[in-house]
Image (tube, rainbow, N blue to C red):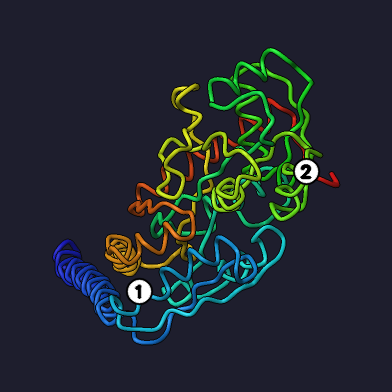
Amino acid sequence: MKQRQQAIRPPRRQALRTATLALALGLTGAFGATAAWAQKYPDKPIRLVVGYSAGGGVDAAARILSARLPAVLGQQVVVENRAGATGMIAADLVAKAAPDGYTLMMGDSAMLIAKLLQPKIAIDPLTTFKPVAGAFISPLMIVTGNDFPARTPAELVTELKKHPGRYSFATSGVGTVQHLGFEMLKQATGSFVVHVPYRGAAQIVPDVVGGQVPIGVVSATAGMAQAKAGKLRALALMNKARLEAAEGVAPLADALPGFDVAPRLFLLAPAGTPDEIVDKLSAAVKTVLDTPEAATSAAAQGTLRAYATPAQLRKEMVDENARWKRIITEQRIVAEGS
Protein backbone atom coordinates (compact mmCIF):
# COMPACT_ATOMS: atom_id res chain seq x y z
CA MET A 1 0.00 0.00 0.00
CA LYS A 2 2.87 2.34 0.88
CA GLN A 3 4.44 1.66 -2.48
CA ARG A 4 1.22 2.66 -4.22
CA GLN A 5 1.02 5.98 -2.27
CA GLN A 6 4.64 6.75 -3.11
CA ALA A 7 3.93 6.12 -6.77
CA ILE A 8 0.99 8.54 -6.76
CA ARG A 9 2.56 11.51 -4.87
CA PRO A 10 5.30 12.51 -7.36
CA PRO A 11 2.82 13.16 -10.22
CA ARG A 12 0.71 15.35 -7.86
CA ARG A 13 3.74 17.44 -6.90
CA GLN A 14 4.66 17.66 -10.56
CA ALA A 15 1.12 18.85 -11.41
CA LEU A 16 1.35 21.52 -8.71
CA ARG A 17 4.70 22.72 -10.05
CA THR A 18 3.29 22.76 -13.57
CA ALA A 19 0.24 24.80 -12.47
CA THR A 20 2.43 27.28 -10.57
CA LEU A 21 4.70 27.70 -13.56
CA ALA A 22 1.71 28.24 -15.84
CA LEU A 23 0.32 30.91 -13.50
CA ALA A 24 3.68 32.67 -13.37
CA LEU A 25 3.99 32.60 -17.15
CA GLY A 26 0.42 33.90 -17.44
CA LEU A 27 1.14 36.82 -15.14
CA THR A 28 4.36 37.57 -16.99
CA GLY A 29 2.42 37.56 -20.23
CA ALA A 30 -0.20 39.92 -18.78
CA PHE A 31 2.42 42.35 -17.52
CA GLY A 32 4.19 42.12 -20.84
CA ALA A 33 0.97 42.92 -22.68
CA THR A 34 0.35 45.94 -20.42
CA ALA A 35 3.88 47.23 -20.99
CA ALA A 36 3.54 46.78 -24.74
CA TRP A 37 0.19 48.58 -24.69
CA ALA A 38 1.72 51.46 -22.74
CA GLN A 39 4.60 51.70 -25.22
CA LYS A 40 2.13 52.15 -28.08
CA TYR A 41 0.10 54.73 -26.14
CA PRO A 42 -1.26 57.03 -27.41
CA ASP A 43 -2.43 55.84 -30.81
CA LYS A 44 -5.58 58.00 -31.01
CA PRO A 45 -6.71 61.47 -29.83
CA ILE A 46 -7.00 62.20 -26.09
CA ARG A 47 -9.98 63.97 -24.48
CA LEU A 48 -9.17 66.59 -21.84
CA VAL A 49 -12.44 67.28 -20.01
CA VAL A 50 -12.96 70.65 -18.29
CA GLY A 51 -15.75 71.17 -15.78
CA TYR A 52 -16.30 74.81 -16.68
CA SER A 53 -17.36 76.87 -19.68
CA ALA A 54 -14.95 77.85 -22.42
CA GLY A 55 -13.09 81.09 -21.75
CA GLY A 56 -12.70 80.65 -17.99
CA GLY A 57 -9.46 80.24 -16.09
CA VAL A 58 -9.48 76.42 -15.90
CA ASP A 59 -10.39 76.19 -19.58
CA ALA A 60 -7.59 78.60 -20.54
CA ALA A 61 -5.06 76.55 -18.58
CA ALA A 62 -6.26 73.33 -20.22
CA ARG A 63 -5.78 74.87 -23.65
CA ILE A 64 -2.18 75.81 -22.84
CA LEU A 65 -1.55 72.09 -22.48
CA SER A 66 -3.79 70.88 -25.30
CA ALA A 67 -2.05 73.17 -27.79
CA ARG A 68 1.40 71.82 -26.96
CA LEU A 69 1.00 68.21 -25.80
CA PRO A 70 0.45 66.87 -29.37
CA ALA A 71 4.03 67.79 -30.26
CA VAL A 72 5.22 65.61 -27.36
CA LEU A 73 2.72 62.74 -27.49
CA GLY A 74 2.17 62.57 -31.23
CA GLN A 75 -1.62 62.69 -30.90
CA GLN A 76 -4.21 65.44 -30.76
CA VAL A 77 -5.48 66.53 -27.33
CA VAL A 78 -9.06 67.82 -27.54
CA VAL A 79 -10.57 70.01 -24.80
CA GLU A 80 -14.17 69.10 -24.00
CA ASN A 81 -16.19 71.47 -21.79
CA ARG A 82 -18.79 69.88 -19.53
CA ALA A 83 -19.80 72.76 -17.25
CA GLY A 84 -21.97 72.49 -14.16
CA ALA A 85 -22.11 71.54 -10.47
CA THR A 86 -18.67 72.96 -9.64
CA GLY A 87 -17.01 70.58 -12.05
CA MET A 88 -18.81 67.50 -10.78
CA ILE A 89 -20.60 66.80 -14.08
CA ALA A 90 -17.25 66.56 -15.81
CA ALA A 91 -15.81 64.58 -12.91
CA ASP A 92 -18.58 61.99 -13.17
CA LEU A 93 -17.96 61.60 -16.91
CA VAL A 94 -14.23 61.04 -16.44
CA ALA A 95 -14.69 58.75 -13.45
CA LYS A 96 -16.85 56.43 -15.56
CA ALA A 97 -14.50 56.49 -18.58
CA ALA A 98 -12.26 53.57 -19.46
CA PRO A 99 -8.96 53.77 -17.51
CA ASP A 100 -6.89 53.75 -20.68
CA GLY A 101 -5.41 57.25 -20.71
CA TYR A 102 -7.68 58.57 -23.46
CA THR A 103 -10.04 60.51 -21.15
CA LEU A 104 -8.44 62.92 -18.68
CA MET A 105 -9.71 65.75 -16.49
CA MET A 106 -8.39 69.22 -15.77
CA GLY A 107 -9.19 69.29 -12.07
CA ASP A 108 -8.97 72.15 -9.62
CA SER A 109 -9.16 72.94 -5.91
CA ALA A 110 -12.92 73.51 -6.12
CA MET A 111 -13.39 69.76 -6.60
CA LEU A 112 -11.88 69.08 -3.19
CA ILE A 113 -14.06 71.70 -1.51
CA ALA A 114 -17.27 70.51 -3.20
CA LYS A 115 -16.97 67.05 -1.66
CA LEU A 116 -16.36 68.51 1.80
CA LEU A 117 -19.37 70.84 1.66
CA GLN A 118 -21.64 68.26 0.06
CA PRO A 119 -20.67 64.83 1.43
CA LYS A 120 -23.43 63.11 -0.56
CA ILE A 121 -21.56 63.78 -3.80
CA ALA A 122 -20.48 60.38 -5.10
CA ILE A 123 -17.20 61.65 -6.56
CA ASP A 124 -14.28 61.78 -4.14
CA PRO A 125 -11.28 63.37 -5.91
CA LEU A 126 -8.87 61.59 -3.56
CA THR A 127 -10.08 58.08 -4.43
CA THR A 128 -12.06 58.29 -7.68
CA PHE A 129 -9.11 59.47 -9.76
CA LYS A 130 -5.45 58.77 -10.28
CA PRO A 131 -3.19 61.86 -10.06
CA VAL A 132 -1.28 62.53 -13.27
CA ALA A 133 0.46 65.89 -12.89
CA GLY A 134 0.25 69.22 -11.13
CA ALA A 135 0.12 71.96 -13.76
CA PHE A 136 -0.69 75.51 -12.62
CA ILE A 137 -1.48 77.78 -9.70
CA SER A 138 -4.04 80.55 -10.26
CA PRO A 139 -3.15 83.40 -7.86
CA LEU A 140 -5.89 85.25 -6.02
CA MET A 141 -5.76 88.95 -5.24
CA ILE A 142 -7.29 91.12 -2.54
CA VAL A 143 -8.50 94.37 -4.07
CA THR A 144 -9.94 97.48 -2.43
CA GLY A 145 -11.22 100.87 -3.37
CA ASN A 146 -8.58 103.58 -3.80
CA ASP A 147 -9.67 105.27 -0.57
CA PHE A 148 -9.24 102.15 1.59
CA PRO A 149 -7.02 102.96 4.62
CA ALA A 150 -4.55 100.11 4.05
CA ARG A 151 -1.97 100.01 1.26
CA THR A 152 0.14 96.98 2.23
CA PRO A 153 -0.56 93.49 3.59
CA ALA A 154 0.70 94.54 7.04
CA GLU A 155 -1.57 97.59 7.07
CA LEU A 156 -4.51 95.42 5.98
CA VAL A 157 -3.96 93.05 8.89
CA THR A 158 -3.73 95.97 11.32
CA GLU A 159 -6.87 97.61 9.93
CA LEU A 160 -8.97 94.44 10.10
CA LYS A 161 -7.88 93.68 13.66
CA LYS A 162 -8.41 97.27 14.79
CA HIS A 163 -11.97 97.53 13.44
CA PRO A 164 -13.85 94.22 13.86
CA GLY A 165 -17.11 94.18 11.93
CA ARG A 166 -16.48 97.45 10.09
CA TYR A 167 -15.63 95.87 6.76
CA SER A 168 -17.12 93.30 4.41
CA PHE A 169 -15.47 91.24 1.69
CA ALA A 170 -16.91 89.97 -1.58
CA THR A 171 -16.13 86.62 -3.20
CA SER A 172 -17.65 84.57 -5.99
CA GLY A 173 -19.69 82.46 -3.59
CA VAL A 174 -19.90 80.48 -0.36
CA GLY A 175 -17.35 77.68 -0.23
CA THR A 176 -15.19 78.96 -3.08
CA VAL A 177 -11.41 79.08 -2.73
CA GLN A 178 -11.73 82.88 -2.55
CA HIS A 179 -14.16 82.61 0.36
CA LEU A 180 -12.26 79.95 2.29
CA GLY A 181 -8.96 81.74 1.66
CA PHE A 182 -10.25 84.93 3.26
CA GLU A 183 -11.72 82.90 6.13
CA MET A 184 -8.18 81.63 6.71
CA LEU A 185 -7.00 85.25 6.78
CA LYS A 186 -9.68 86.12 9.32
CA GLN A 187 -8.70 83.16 11.45
CA ALA A 188 -4.98 83.97 11.26
CA THR A 189 -5.59 87.57 12.34
CA GLY A 190 -8.45 87.02 14.77
CA SER A 191 -10.50 89.57 12.84
CA PHE A 192 -14.20 89.73 12.03
CA VAL A 193 -15.15 90.67 8.46
CA VAL A 194 -18.60 90.08 6.93
CA HIS A 195 -18.77 87.85 3.85
CA VAL A 196 -20.83 89.02 0.87
CA PRO A 197 -21.21 86.28 -1.78
CA TYR A 198 -21.42 87.37 -5.42
CA ARG A 199 -21.75 85.40 -8.65
CA GLY A 200 -18.25 86.22 -9.90
CA ALA A 201 -15.49 88.76 -10.47
CA ALA A 202 -17.49 90.47 -13.22
CA GLN A 203 -19.91 91.67 -10.53
CA ILE A 204 -17.39 92.13 -7.69
CA VAL A 205 -14.92 94.45 -9.40
CA PRO A 206 -17.45 97.16 -10.38
CA ASP A 207 -18.85 97.18 -6.83
CA VAL A 208 -15.37 97.54 -5.32
CA VAL A 209 -14.64 100.38 -7.74
CA GLY A 210 -17.98 101.99 -6.92
CA GLY A 211 -17.59 101.60 -3.17
CA GLN A 212 -20.55 99.26 -2.63
CA VAL A 213 -18.20 96.73 -1.01
CA PRO A 214 -14.78 97.71 0.43
CA ILE A 215 -12.84 94.49 -0.18
CA GLY A 216 -12.95 91.96 -3.00
CA VAL A 217 -11.18 88.65 -3.54
CA VAL A 218 -10.77 87.93 -7.26
CA SER A 219 -8.33 86.33 -9.67
CA ALA A 220 -5.09 88.24 -10.12
CA THR A 221 -5.96 88.74 -13.78
CA ALA A 222 -9.31 90.36 -12.98
CA GLY A 223 -7.77 92.52 -10.27
CA MET A 224 -4.76 93.79 -12.19
CA ALA A 225 -6.75 94.92 -15.21
CA GLN A 226 -8.57 97.53 -13.13
CA ALA A 227 -5.62 98.30 -10.85
CA LYS A 228 -3.46 99.26 -13.83
CA ALA A 229 -6.26 101.54 -14.99
CA GLY A 230 -6.19 103.22 -11.58
CA LYS A 231 -9.77 102.29 -10.73
CA LEU A 232 -8.97 100.19 -7.66
CA ARG A 233 -6.04 99.12 -5.48
CA ALA A 234 -4.37 95.73 -5.85
CA LEU A 235 -3.51 95.29 -2.19
CA ALA A 236 -2.14 91.76 -1.78
CA LEU A 237 -1.65 88.38 -3.41
CA MET A 238 -2.93 85.41 -1.43
CA ASN A 239 -0.21 83.02 -2.61
CA LYS A 240 3.44 83.20 -1.53
CA ALA A 241 5.01 83.67 -4.96
CA ARG A 242 5.01 87.01 -6.74
CA LEU A 243 3.34 87.24 -10.12
CA GLU A 244 5.09 88.54 -13.23
CA ALA A 245 2.07 90.61 -14.25
CA ALA A 246 1.78 92.07 -10.73
CA GLU A 247 5.38 92.71 -9.69
CA GLY A 248 4.45 95.53 -7.34
CA VAL A 249 1.81 93.57 -5.42
CA ALA A 250 3.15 91.96 -2.25
CA PRO A 251 1.98 88.58 -0.96
CA LEU A 252 0.06 88.31 2.30
CA ALA A 253 2.89 86.09 3.50
CA ASP A 254 4.92 89.30 4.00
CA ALA A 255 2.64 90.06 6.94
CA LEU A 256 1.53 86.50 7.75
CA PRO A 257 4.53 84.17 7.26
CA GLY A 258 3.57 80.95 5.52
CA PHE A 259 0.14 82.16 4.37
CA ASP A 260 -0.51 80.56 0.99
CA VAL A 261 -3.89 80.16 -0.67
CA ALA A 262 -4.39 79.72 -4.40
CA PRO A 263 -6.50 77.48 -6.62
CA ARG A 264 -4.44 74.63 -8.01
CA LEU A 265 -5.01 73.11 -11.43
CA PHE A 266 -4.00 69.53 -12.13
CA LEU A 267 -4.48 66.57 -14.46
CA LEU A 268 -6.41 63.50 -13.30
CA ALA A 269 -7.12 60.13 -14.89
CA PRO A 270 -9.73 57.50 -13.99
CA ALA A 271 -8.69 55.20 -11.15
CA GLY A 272 -7.07 52.07 -12.52
CA THR A 273 -5.17 53.79 -15.32
CA PRO A 274 -1.83 51.91 -15.72
CA ASP A 275 1.18 53.53 -14.08
CA GLU A 276 3.13 53.37 -17.34
CA ILE A 277 0.55 55.56 -19.08
CA VAL A 278 0.28 57.97 -16.14
CA ASP A 279 4.07 58.36 -16.07
CA LYS A 280 4.18 59.01 -19.82
CA LEU A 281 1.48 61.67 -19.54
CA SER A 282 3.11 63.29 -16.54
CA ALA A 283 6.47 63.49 -18.29
CA ALA A 284 4.78 65.05 -21.32
CA VAL A 285 3.13 67.72 -19.14
CA LYS A 286 6.50 68.56 -17.59
CA THR A 287 8.08 68.87 -21.03
CA VAL A 288 5.36 71.32 -22.08
CA LEU A 289 5.51 73.38 -18.90
CA ASP A 290 9.28 73.71 -19.19
CA THR A 291 9.01 75.53 -22.54
CA PRO A 292 9.29 79.34 -22.80
CA GLU A 293 6.08 79.36 -24.84
CA ALA A 294 4.11 77.79 -21.98
CA ALA A 295 5.63 80.28 -19.55
CA THR A 296 4.55 83.20 -21.74
CA SER A 297 1.03 81.82 -22.18
CA ALA A 298 0.66 81.15 -18.44
CA ALA A 299 1.78 84.66 -17.55
CA ALA A 300 -0.71 86.10 -20.03
CA GLN A 301 -3.48 84.13 -18.29
CA GLY A 302 -2.36 85.24 -14.83
CA THR A 303 -1.28 81.75 -13.78
CA LEU A 304 1.96 80.24 -12.53
CA ARG A 305 3.43 76.99 -13.77
CA ALA A 306 3.52 74.45 -10.95
CA TYR A 307 4.48 70.99 -12.20
CA ALA A 308 4.16 68.10 -9.76
CA THR A 309 4.77 64.39 -10.27
CA PRO A 310 1.89 61.95 -9.64
CA ALA A 311 3.22 61.22 -6.14
CA GLN A 312 3.74 64.90 -5.35
CA LEU A 313 0.28 65.77 -6.65
CA ARG A 314 -1.33 63.08 -4.52
CA LYS A 315 0.33 64.52 -1.40
CA GLU A 316 -0.63 68.08 -2.36
CA MET A 317 -4.27 67.06 -2.83
CA VAL A 318 -4.37 65.25 0.51
CA ASP A 319 -2.75 68.19 2.33
CA GLU A 320 -4.99 70.75 0.65
CA ASN A 321 -8.08 68.70 1.40
CA ALA A 322 -7.11 68.65 5.09
CA ARG A 323 -6.68 72.44 5.14
CA TRP A 324 -10.08 73.06 3.54
CA LYS A 325 -11.74 70.58 5.87
CA ARG A 326 -10.23 72.27 8.91
CA ILE A 327 -11.34 75.80 7.95
CA ILE A 328 -14.83 74.61 6.93
CA THR A 329 -15.26 72.87 10.29
CA GLU A 330 -13.76 75.59 12.47
CA GLN A 331 -15.59 78.46 10.75
CA ARG A 332 -18.81 76.40 10.49
CA ILE A 333 -19.23 77.02 6.79
CA VAL A 334 -22.15 75.32 5.07
CA ALA A 335 -23.02 75.14 1.40
CA GLU A 336 -25.61 77.53 0.02
CA GLY A 337 -29.05 75.97 0.18
CA SER A 338 -28.05 73.45 2.87
Label 2 and label 1: CA atoms lie apart by 43 Å
Q: Residue at x 22, y 69 (%)?
A: 24
Secondary structure type for disc 2:
helix
95 sits left or right of 250 in the view: right
Q: How many marks?
A: 2
Labels 2, 1: front one? 2
Q: Nearer the viewer, residue 22 or 141?
A: 141
Q: Amino acid at mark 1?
A: Leu
Residue 280 sits above or below residue 45 on the image:
above
Tell me residue 178's x, y (percent): 64, 42
Mark number for residue 210?
2
Tell me residue 52's x, y (percent): 63, 65
Residue that extends furthest to the bottom in the rendered view of this protein: 44
Residue that extends furthest to the right in the rendered view of this protein: 337
**Mark closest to the chain's N terminus, 2 or 1:** 1
Q: Amino acid at mark 2?
A: Gly
Viewport quadrant of the C terminus: top right
Mark number for residue 69?
1
Secondary structure type for disc 1:
helix
Sort mark 2 into few (<14), some (14-19) or many (20+) by Cα contacts within 10 Å. Answer: few
Residue 209 sits above or below residue 152 on the image:
below
280 sits left or right of 196 in the view: left
Mark number for residue 256?
none
Tell me if I can see residue 281 in this picture: yes
Sort mark 1 into few (<14), some (14-19) or many (20+) by Cα contacts within 10 Å. Answer: many
Snapshot quadrant of residue 39: bottom left
Tell me if I can see residue 22 in this picture: no
128 sits left or right of 119 in the view: left
